[in-house]
Amino acid sequence: MAESVFQHSAEKMRERSMSELSINQFQTMIDTWRHDAASAWIREQDVEPLTGIPSFHDVYATINHTKAIDAFAKTAFLKLNGGLGTSMGLESAKSLIPVRRHKARQMRFIDIIVGQVLTARTRLNVELPLTFMNSFRTSADTMHVLRSNGAFQQADVPMEIMQHQEPKLDVTTGEPVSFPDDPTLEWCPPGHGDVYSSIWESGLLDVLEQRGFKYLFISNSDNLGARPSRTLAQHFENTGAPFMVEVATRTEADRKGGHIVRDRRTGRLMLREMTQVKDEDKDAAQDIVKHPYFNTNSIWIRVDALKAKLEQYHGVLPLPVIRNYKTVDPTDERSPRVIQLETAMGAAIALFDGAICVQVDRMRFLPVKTTDDLFIMRSDRFHLTDSYEMEDGNYLFPAVSLDPRYYKHITDFNERFPYSMPSLAAANSVTVHGDWTFGQNVAFYGDAVLEDQGRPSYVPNGEYVGPQGVEPDEWL
């Protein structure tokens, strides 16, 4: 790409008062996109599967749990909170979605996260600072919630750092796209790999070092399973590793998720997203026996190691660039085609000698990416404990497919469940075709299916829904 084309993006970013660091990061991503096409792919022949890693249970059996409080006391907590939940039709932080009630109080993601932190602080007598990485769209709402919570106090470590933003690029020209109908849609986040540059620019690492914190635990705000853990803090300290990724065992539902592999040439671990897999390698990459673990996007980093690495690269880590092709208005397929350049947080594992993984149970991976996920989270499969843990019997959930025409957006979803979520206790899978609204005390069982009736339909109070739809009132 001609230098002048990048300059148009740089000028646009400066007009929005963006920092030179964010502009340098974007230039690095553009250069990689335009001039290093080979970096877009991680070939199966060049990697080895990740095997033989310790599990949480292995770790739990070997550590001194009293001593673990000391490692935990040196840990800080960072939540990625820049997402709007646009896939669910939201225009505010996804973390503000109500998840379920607890003792008659409506609990949002952010309330549960804060509850988990306050519980750990009280029970273990540790400081455990909590910082959110917000975007320009999530900052105000998030900070209002935190400041309104009288129980949550934090003075010496910032409660937020700000995520960068970048222009969406016209697919054909590489120019920053123009969209006068809604200029805010001309911008996007640079992916969660931006967390490192944001941390660097914020000065957070210096603050943590001055306060005696040695470890940083980073996870997504929509993953309520990623709770603070003294067990993992002590394990991380024991290993002396600079970087640790939590991985979980893949199921068929996880075939298309990012997974950790080992680079045959360097011996280092690396994250491979499915967007980095060539078509001819997809069968192997999605083989859950060959590649048994997926990336949960929960990572542990030594503060000093991260600081040294960021100093080495002047605040911009050389991460693989993910090409994300979309329309400038995600809700309008007729709007101009754009490319969003992104990086993945977990990809930084390849920059650290001695980086490791630890296998965790599904109870530490409870993400909500769609209303299908939220349906499960709000159902009777879960119980929210007094220590703000989302508990389930086995964490193996029914496959849920709700008709996106009527359930994709949160407003439509809420309207169709006006009383409560149907029971999923006896369900193996749930498939809803068409526009159905649900009464009280409805229960799904087996491989439940509701077919499209061609009109708005209703499941009355107390009915059972199974493989044949709503069960008849009488024996046939």
Image: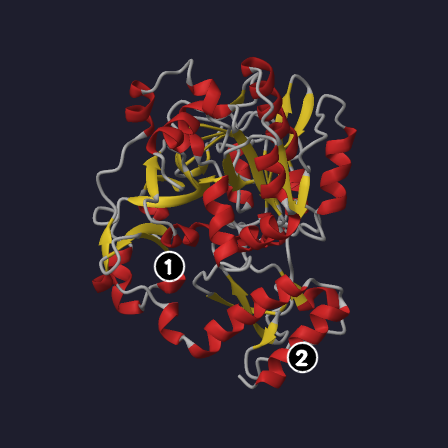
Find the distance from the CA under tag 1 to the CA under tag 2. 31 Å
- The residue carrying mark 2 is 8
- Point out the tag, 1 or 2, that comes first from the N-terminus: 2
Label 2 is placed on what type of residue? His
Residue found at x 65% / y 16%: 103
Residue found at x 69% / y 62%: 19
Label 1 is placed on what type of residue? Met
Q: Which mark is residue 274?
A: 1
- Left or right of 89 on screen, residue 249: left
Residue found at x 39% / y 33%: 362
Is residue 222 or residue 72 the one in the foreground? 72
Q: Position of residue 115 (x, y in %)?
A: 62, 24
Is residue 4 or residue 273 the one in the foreground? 4
Above or below, 151 relative to 353: above
Is residue 414 or residue 159 the one in the foreground? 159
Q: Position of residue 354 (x, y in %)?
A: 32, 44
